[in-house]
Image (cartoon, helix red, strand yellow):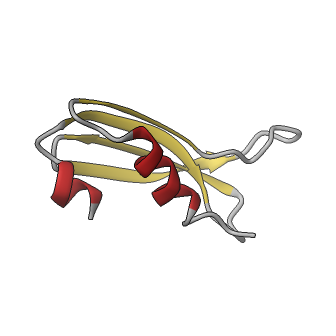
């Protein structure tokens, strides 16, 4: 949905994501509306499983982006 709505304004997106009940890290990257990702291996022991995303773009609403992704977080 984000790529559909803001794809023209999203110049670059990248990050590492962690999924509930999954020990592997997921690497995500996108340029405008073209996105790709894959699992890249296990998290290092002792490292916090914290997802991080970086958005580079124009006319992006930071609070709205944060709320949207926080709404996807597992408990």
32 sits left or right of 2 in the view: left
Q: Residue at x 68, y 68 (%)?
A: 74
Examine the rendered structure and indicate whether residue 42 appears above or below residue 73: above
Give the number of callouts: 0
Question: In the displayed image of the protein, which residue is found farthest to the left?
Answer: 8
Nearer to the camera, 56 or 36: 56
Question: In the displayed image of the protein, which residue is found farthest to the right?
Answer: 46
Examine the rendered structure and indicate whether residue 10 appears above or below residue 36: above
- Residue 43's x, y, as percent? 72, 45
Nearer to the camera, 67 or 25: 67
Q: Residue at x 42, y 39 (%)?
A: 62
- Residue 53's x, y, as percent? 48, 39
Quarter holding the N terminus is bottom left
Nearer to the camera, 7 or 66: 66
Q: Residue at x 61, y 46 (%)?
A: 51
- Residue 25's x, y, as percent? 60, 50
Q: Residue at x 51, y 55 (%)?
A: 67
The image quarter containing residue 13 is top left
Examine the rendered structure and indicate whether residue 70 appears above or below residue 58: below
Residue 27 appears in view: no
Residue 35 appears in view: yes
73 sits left or right of 34 in the view: right
Quarter holding the C terminus is bottom right
- Residue 9's x, y, as percent? 16, 38
């Amino acid at each position: 949905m984000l790529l559909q709505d803001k794809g023209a304004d999203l110049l670059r997106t990248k990050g590492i994501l962690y999924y509930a009940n999954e020990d592997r890290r997921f690497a995500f990257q996108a340029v405008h509306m073209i996105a790709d990702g894959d699992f890249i291996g296990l998290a290092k022991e002792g490292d916090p499983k914290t997802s991080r995303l970086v958005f580079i773009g124009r006319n992006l609403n930071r609070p709205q982006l944060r709320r949207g992704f926080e709404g996807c977080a597992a408990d």
